[in-house]
Image (cartoon, rainbow, N blue to C red):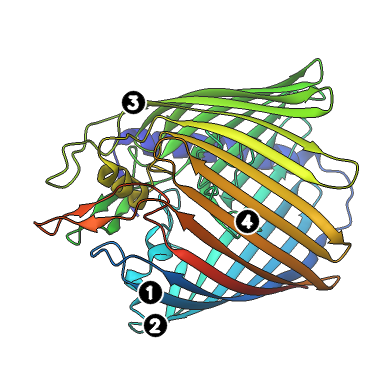
Amino acid sequence: MTFMGSNNGRIIFLLIFLSLMAMGTAHENQEEYNPTYLSRLGGSFRTYATSSFYTELPPFFLSQERVGQSLLRLTAEGRPFKWLSYNVHLVQNLTAANISLDQVYAFRLEDNRYQGVAASLDLYEKDKVRAASRLDRMNIKVALPWLDITLGRQAVTFGKAYFWNPLDVFLSFKSIQMDRDYKRGVDGIRLDLPLGLYSGVNLLYVAGKEIYFDESFAHTRLDTNISWYGSALLVRYFTKLKEWDLSFQAGKVYGGYHTGGGMTGELGPLEFRMEAAYFFSLKQIALPNPLPDLLLEDYLTAVLGIGHRFKNGLLVEIEVFLNGRAQTEYLESALLRLVHGSNDHLSTRLLGTMLSYDFLPIINSRLVWVYSLSDRSSLFQPSLSISLTDESDLILGGNICLGEEPYLSQNQYPRILSEFGTYPDVLYLEYKIYF
């Protein structure tokens, strides 16, 4: 591993030095403690099958794909000292498809930009079958009376909106993502300084790499070196004011600089969520010809949401999203930004609605509707979850997409007419068990 530029090395050295000083201080001040080297050993196993139906549009999509995947997650936690704890998640996956896995759309959207350390191993790989292991989380935490320090691969979540999180800059869930049980970890150092019962400061350095478009136009590749361009150095302040949770954050993120804030609270029977963030691009990178746009530009994102749970148990969540990263003129550019990971949507304005209701204590139904106010396309996500035991569930669901479909122009160039008309219809069946 090499570091591009002296800033990265200095930041990492400073944060590791502070961590080591804290460990030494904690060791000196530790009281008698009964060590727990392995306090919890568990995990989950899930297997699912999907069938997707596209309008054929090379090089982005083929006409149909069927994918099956099984995931075994092993988790371990321990606290060998009063001041020191650890957390490890090891994931083993086996994936098979009816087409090359490099052509499966979901695999193109895997964003590893903030995983600066290679922590995966391919055990078996052929064109349509792949088995691999990866460390999804591996970190240690030093707990001091005045400061917590977490070092290693860890899940970082900022923001409290349901569909869209402008403040959650570290591998956030996509609004159309079906599986949200575990968020992937990022490689970095986190300092948590409490300032009161409901206030505090978070300081993070996250090591990241730069992503490039490769020769296949619709695919990307990851640089081998950690760089300042791909890394993040962010400070966040949070507090509570008259029953409202407030947060403000600013710093360096992938490709530029970021500042934003949010607030959540209740007015009468309604829960309100508001977040906004602005991004300043660090450098101009042109998209592949013939697209006239840049990969990253300055932009504003904002979300306003309300939620309410009725007495009969019905939960309703509604959000409106302003997406400054997209544009209405060249949806092809927005699609390439989405493949690159620098954009979550092709639309500039979206409406999200979620209804959730328990028919029985063991049967939960959910319906998600995401509507593009920009191009009038829609995504429906119905799902039914059946609890077979206290630790296992069977889930049936799908993505149903409506909108103008893409086509190939006379020069065989893809033309995108709407966001959700571009995406596939997906049916899936999932079984998961926790142990």
- The residue nearer to you, when weighing 224 against 148, is 224
Q: Are marks 4 and 2 in contact (CB under 8 Å)?
A: no
Q: Which residue is mark 1?
A: 64
Mark 4 and mark 3: Cα distance apart in space: 29 Å
Label 2 crowding class (10 Å Cα cut-off): few <14, some 14-19, many 20+?
some
Label 4 crowding class (10 Å Cα cut-off): few <14, some 14-19, many 20+?
few
Q: Are marks 1 and 4 in contact (CB under 8 Å)?
A: no
- Which element is circle 2 on? loop
In the rendered image, the residue lying farthest to the top is: 242
Which circle marks residue 22 in the picture? none
Q: Which residue is mark 2?
A: 98
Image location of residue 375, percent across then percent down:
39, 40
Q: Is residue 35 left or right of residue 57?
A: right
- Report the amino acid beneath label 3: Asp
Residue shown at 21% from the left, 36% from the top: 293
Give the mark, 1 or 3, whose residue is nearer the N terminus: 1
Which circle marks residue 298 in the picture? 3
Q: Is residue 409 left or right of residue 250?
A: left
